[in-house]
Amino acid sequence: MSDCSTIIKLIHAYLDGELDVKESIRVQAHLEECERCRRLYQDEKAFLDLLPSGLTTRSAPRLARQHISDALSREATRRQRQRRRRMIAVSPAVLAAVAVLIAFFAAPRSHVPGLVQVAVSEHERYLKDPTSLGLTNSDHRTVVDWLRPRLQMPLHLPIDRIPEGQLAGATVLTRGGQAAYLVYRFGNEPVSLLVTTPRELRMFGEQVHTFKNTFFQPATVEGHHTLLWSDRRHTYVLVAERAETLSQACVICHSSQQGRGLVAGFSTET
């Protein structure tokens, strides 16, 4: 479920119909589950419903409208002349520099969030040097107990063993904010899991999926398969070499019987 403070900021835009489809679905899903935010929404809507019946509109006098229109027209003409004079005074070198900047900012950019880039970078680092982890240990409780005092955030991770995979170790990252970085092995394939504080994520593309009121963004970055999502506790990034292994690695956080049902449901939805 989305953070209440974020939803409250979006309620007026939601009432005015200014949100895109994805944001509207997000707000609607939150309102269905959160009574406090739903009451606030209902109060705001009731207030807005009263406004049309209690307000009257009056037209400005014809002469006043004409004066305003003339003033706006004169101001637009003045600004247009100023722009022309500036263009005449600009040197060819400046125009060339402006053209370069326009080309730079108009060029297509990668929509992969920086947090995913960090996770991929650490995954590649581990592939090159498996000894780069701060702690090498396969016991979940030992690794979590080692991470917690080194992190400035609460850490919620399962401590049960995973039959499908084995924990290799962990370290603490400080790039772009503090994060826990864990490595698991599913067969011979390593899977990285980055865990950090919950963040508002701006996701792009047709590959964004919604499941249980949570947005997931899979992506392929530099040949690696990644999955990004966020909940009330943390923001996560999974990285693996194959999409099948990435799907299998969801049991890291959902190793219980109920959790495995969620994983199966997510696979069916996506």
Image (cartoon, helix red, strand yellow):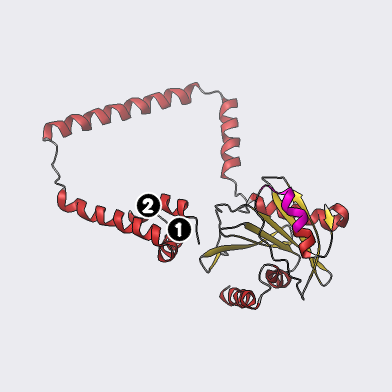
In the image, what residue occupies the spot 39% across and 24% down?
82
Name the quadrant of the C terminus: bottom right
Q: Which residue is mark 2?
A: 13
Q: Is residue 104 above or below residue 140?
A: above
For numbered disc 1, what is the local secondary structure? helix
Q: Which residue is mark 1?
A: 23
Precedes in sequence: disc 1 or disc 2: 2
In the image, what residue occupies the spot 66% across and 71% down?
254
For numbered disc 2, what is the local secondary structure? helix
- Asked whether, in this view, residue 56 is left or right of residue 137, the answer is left
The part of the image, by quadrant, that contains residue 85 is top left
149 magenta-colored? yes
The part of the image, by quadrant, that contains residue 169 is bottom right
Residues at discs 1 and 2 in contact (Cβ within 8 Å): yes
Main secondary structure type of the part rendered in magenta: helix
- Asked whether, in this view, residue 78 is left or right of residue 68, the answer is right
Amino acid type at mark 2: Ala
In the image, what residue occupies the spot 71% across and 45% down?
175
The residue segment tinted magenta is 145-152
Q: Nearer the viewer, residue 101 or 215?
A: 215
Per the rendering, the mark at residue 249 is none
Residue 17, x across and y down, in percent: 35, 56
Residue 15, x across and y down, in percent: 33, 55
The part of the image, by quadrant, that contains residue 64 is top left
Residue 111, x across and y down, in percent: 60, 53
Q: Is residue 252 above or below residue 81?
A: below
| Farthest residue, direction top | 89
Q: Marks 1 and 2, Cα distance to the nearest angstrom?
A: 10 Å
